[in-house]
Amino acid sequence: MKPSVSVITLGVDDLEASVKFYRDGLGLSTQGIIGQEFDHGAVAFFDLQHGLKLALFARTNIAHDAGIEPGGRSATEFTLGHNVGSEAEVDAVMTQAIGAGARLVKRAQKTFWGGYAGYFQDPDGHLWEVVYNPALLPDD
């Protein structure tokens, strides 16, 4: 297996509200909700960098597709990291997310390892870390 990821899918409770948060609140590009003509098929894709996609899919539809029982939420199972080029960018993204309806989890601050980071949760409880890591600067 090649070490690559092409789609990150987040299970959501309200697909339309989640699309609004990511599209209108955070400014991510999407064609909107597609697949509504299929039972358990409604999904939204957002373009990220280098061909990576973020997908939003109802939690119940993920469970149906995988053939498992729906599970409960847990914000600590994984985080999504958004690495930016400066502390000011961390603050700007955090402000944008909170303005869009995210819940502030941890204010951006200096880290023990020499960076600067904060956490927010999207409307479905997914945990995002916005981070400036001087050792891992983004390409753009």
Image (cartoon, rainbow, N blue to C red):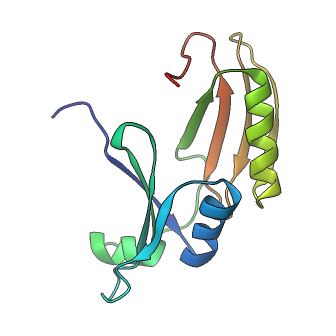
Q: Residue at x 33, y 89 (%)?
A: 37
Q: Quadrant of residue 66?
A: bottom left
Q: Quadrant of residue 33?
A: bottom left
Q: Give the residue drawn at x 60%, y 62%.
A: 23
Q: Quadrant of the N terminus?
A: top left
**Left-right relation of 43 to 121:** left
Could you say where residue 12 lies in the image, as x and y percent from the top left? 54, 69
Above/below status of 92 relative to 63 = above
Instruction: Using the image as rendered, state which of residue 126 and residue 134 is in the foreground.
Output: 134
Decide: is 14 above or below 87: below
Q: Position of residue 108 (x, y in %)?
A: 81, 31
Percent position of residue 136, x then y: 54, 16
Instruction: Tell me if residue 133 comes above or below residue 128 in the rendering.
Output: above
Pick out the residue farthest to the left: 1
From this viewpoint, is residue 46 visible?
yes
User: Can see residue 69?
Assistant: no
Q: Place residue 107 in its image quadrant.
A: top right
- Compared across the picture, whether 130 is left or right of 51 comes to right
Locate residue 67 relative to residue 92 in the image: left or right.
left
Q: Is residue 26 left or right of residue 47?
A: right
Label total for image: 0
Q: What residue is rendered at 55% in x and 67% in y?
A: 72
For residue 125, above or below residue 2: below
Q: Residue at x 46, y 45 (%)?
A: 48
Q: Position of residue 87 (x, y in %)?
A: 77, 22
